[in-house]
Amino acid sequence: MLRKDLAKISKEDLWKAGRLSTRAYNVCCRSRLNTLADILLYFESGQSFKHIKQAGTKTQEELFLLSKEVVSNLEDDDVRFGGDYFPVNGLEIRKSFEALGEEQKAVLELWYDKKKRELKAREFHAVEHWTLEDFYREVWCCPDFSFHRLPHIGKFSIEGLEKFRLFLEKKVEELSGCEERQIVLEKAILRYGNFCADPFVLAYWEERKHLPMFWLLGKKLESQMGRDYAIFRETFPLYENQTVRSLEEVAAEKELSKERVRQIRNQVLHDLFNDQNVFFQTQEDWTGYLPEIAGEVASSSSYNGREMNVRERTHFSSLFIFRIFAFVFDSQVKLIGDPGTLKRGSISWNNTFLVRSRIFEIFDFDRFREDVESRLSNERSEDWICHINDYLDDSLCWKEYDLEEYDAVKTVVLEIFLQEFRLYLDDEDRIVIPANKEKPTEEIVKILEENGRPMYLQEIFKRYGEKFPYRFSYPKQLRSSMTFEDRIVAIGRSGRYALKEWNVNTGTIREVIVEFLSKKGIPQTDQAITDYVLKYYPDTNCASIRSTIYEGVEAYGFVFYEKGLFGLKNKDYPSSYIVCEKPELVKKSFEARLADFENFIQEKEHFPFSVSTDKEELTLYRWWKSVLDKKKSLTALQEKKVEEIQVKYARIKKDKWELQWEENLKEIRHFFLTFKRLPKDLGDEKNCLKLWKRLKKDYTENKLTEAQRRAYLELCKLLN
């Protein structure tokens, strides 16, 4: 019997043949001795079967006698694992390896990387820098190779490396006789996960000769749990016919700020469309979709994504499909009007367009859209008519005039005219923009009348857009029209507007305070002032109003009275109210602020973070940031003290993520030391298991610092 044949004999075969008792079989299951080769490897590594948990005297003797019998029956050219060197049949494995095709080697390399990451810390470090080709040269091409020669390797590590080598040799043998369809399936499972084991994947590949990447991506997204992905699914048009919720709605439900919800959505988008995402690392799997982007332009409103969704059993939106194409085929196509890349205040598009990269490079489509919008919104008594060729010839939107691409640019421009503005060419190839005789303010007045209360500019813009979706793209375009309308008034600087006939208070907060104090015969408390101001400015607060009064002493004549009362300089109050000096807003000195900063570090054991519910922590963070950014003028002595703080607390965490990572590590270490095993997906251990998977994922995706990598590897040793 040859040693390589032992791996083909499972513990189930031994049990059915009567070579293992039921008790010995159960011991093998618990100890992961799955084949006869595993049992023999354990025996020849010099370990005693008595060290196996729950292995009694009879079980130990049974496994020992079985191992002795197998050793005596091995052929002469097989040598014990425990010898001076670890022999391999170099010539045979070299021939098998060299005979592998390109796809077969790609699968073997995936297995090599996967199994290498599963090695214990000391074993991994021994072969960390070896590629599959290195392993082939160092191990299989050297007849006298021995893992004993690697530095810092003990007998237990040699056992693990020998199993690693045996696994690879077995894989080489398996791949040598694999059909193409089996190789494709195995590579897909290794690369994208167990979703690929679904029969649909292989059936799709056999029909189209490429993997159903959208189906696989859909399965991956469905498996993602947690708050961030839930927010992403609700606020981004991921699926067709999906009702996208506003940031305000989700923020209220999740008890977050609108800005935080926007940040979370954009962060998930960034993580999804990232070079580190395994779904986008291999472009060869996407080449089957190239016919989908063959034209000059595609619009999200006219693109027939349903056909592909039916084919791939998905229901992604055209926008999401376009985003994937633009990311995967970045050198070939670009997106126009992608909401995932819009910054606040930038141009808003009603549709998304996928165009060839060259067209995108030579023509400024944002500027083109602004030009059309201005023509639509300007008041005109007659239609604006222009031949499409004349419009393009005179356009200032060309970044680089390219006659060869002229027709292609024209095709894209016409598609935008149609989908974005519902404008068509007439029989003479002319663009006709209808006369705009009705002022937008007429509709705005109607909106305010229907609402019956002051409205923010954003609210007015949203309501106006529902009736005229192609006229304006952003709120500030409405503001200029409203400024010169006598029937509409602005309320202070709050961005709210009302009808003049409502007789609302349109002053600033200071002017409202003056109005309130003028009506009163005695000085007022800050709370009474706040209650009055809130009627007109519901978003302010008492602290903001106090600050407003302090800053308006000279300009508005505010006077301070004892017991925290406020009045006006030009009013006469009863003599019982005593005027006092304006309280000074005392600012802390640099030394006092530095002392507070150091006390915070010593108490919390971390630097102040930029995200916190503690206002004092936020204040300290902003102060320290302004010091480091050189925004404060410091003396030489003060700069020296800053350097001393940096040196003294160099090891203290400055990043909230690092601190959280370290706390997670401590929790998992405590569990390992207490129970000597991995946590289970049950009860109180669920959270610990989740933290462990997250640490492992960060390690495999190279997201850790060098210090964190060392800490993770030390943690893994606790399981050895």
Image (cartoon, grey):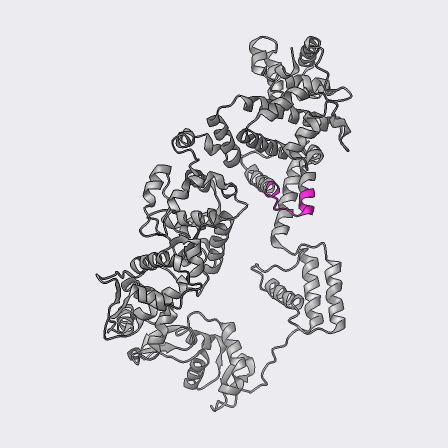
- Please state if 687 lies on the left or on the right of 325 as rendered: right
The x and y percentages for residue 45 are 73, 21
- In this picture, is 202 found above or below 356? above
- Please state if 252 lies on the left or on the right of 135 as rendered: left
Count of numbered marks? 0
Magenta residues, dominant SS class: helix
Note whether residue 459 is visible: no
Residue 703 located within the stretch drawn in magenta: yes
The x and y percentages for residue 195 are 46, 34
* Residue occupying image coordinates x 41% and y 50%: 234
Which of these two is toward me, 553 or 182?
182
Residue 211 located within the stretch drawn in magenta: no
Furthest-front residue in this view: 403
The x and y percentages for residue 635 are 73, 74
Which of these two is toward me, 60 or 343?
343
- Please state if 209 lies on the left or on the right of 43 as rendered: left
Q: In which quarter of the image is the N terminus?
A: top right
The x and y percentages for residue 102 are 55, 31
Note whether residue 480 is visible: yes
Which of these two is toward me, 426 or 419?
426
Q: In which quarter of the image is residue 711?
A: top right
Residue interval drawn in magenta: 698-711
* Residue occupying image coordinates x 78% and y 21%: 84
- Please state if 418 lies on the left or on the right of 662 as rendered: left
- In this picture, is 555 found above or below 85? below
Which of these two is toward me, 39 or 8?
8
- In this picture, is 601 found above or below 269? below
Q: In which quarter of the image is residue 652?
A: bottom right
Q: Quadrant of the C terminus?
A: top right
* Residue occupying image coordinates x 55% and y 28%: 101
